[in-house]
Amino acid sequence: MGLLVNHFNPATVQELMCRSLVSVGWDGRLHDCDFNLMLEIPLGAATATGARTIWEIDSFDRLEAQRIATGRHCFGCTAGAGSSCSGALA
Ligand code: SF4
């Protein structure tokens, strides 16, 4: 964990997949990314929009500019050159 924190690279933040994608669970629940899906962390926007499943939204526009659920595991996406679906720096 210290290794990831010590290698935090702010340049990775703009490219994080959670800023432009969502993950949908088998049961329709929405998550900010596949890591959050596996950790069963619900969509951060749910606190503002109330939308927790794919059936509760008509458009993903509704989720734009809403809070993303983050945690210690996010350091795995922001260390070094970044990681994950479209999140790695070129
Ligand atoms: S783990 Fe955190 S930083 Fe990485 S994509 Fe998910 S919410 Fe974003």
Image: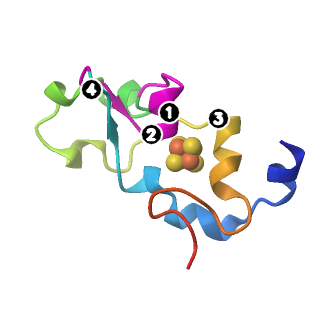
Q: Which numbered disc, 4 or 3, marks the residue closer to the eye? A: 3
- Judge depth for marks 3 and 2 and give the one in front: 2
Whether ligand 1 has any atom under 8 Å from the Cβ at mark 3 is answered as: yes
State yes or no: Cβ of the residue under disc 2 lies below 8 Å from any atom of ligand 1: yes
Picture quadrant where residue 8 is located: bottom right
Q: Is mark 1 within 8 Å of ligand 1?
A: yes
> How packed is label 4: few (under 14 Cα within 10 Å), some, or many (20 or more)?
some
> Is residue 63 among the parts visible in the rendering?
yes
Q: Check the picture and name the quadrant holding the C terminus.
A: bottom right
The one nearer the camera, 51 or 27, is: 27
What residue appears at the point 71 percent right and 36 percent down from the top-left corner? 72
Which residue is disc 4 drawn over?
Answer: 51
Q: Amino acid at mark 3?
A: Gly
Task: State the residue at coordinates (40%, 25%).
Answer: 47
Give the residue at x 36% y 27%: 46
- Mark 1: which secondary structure? helix
Classify mark 3: helix, strand or loop.
loop
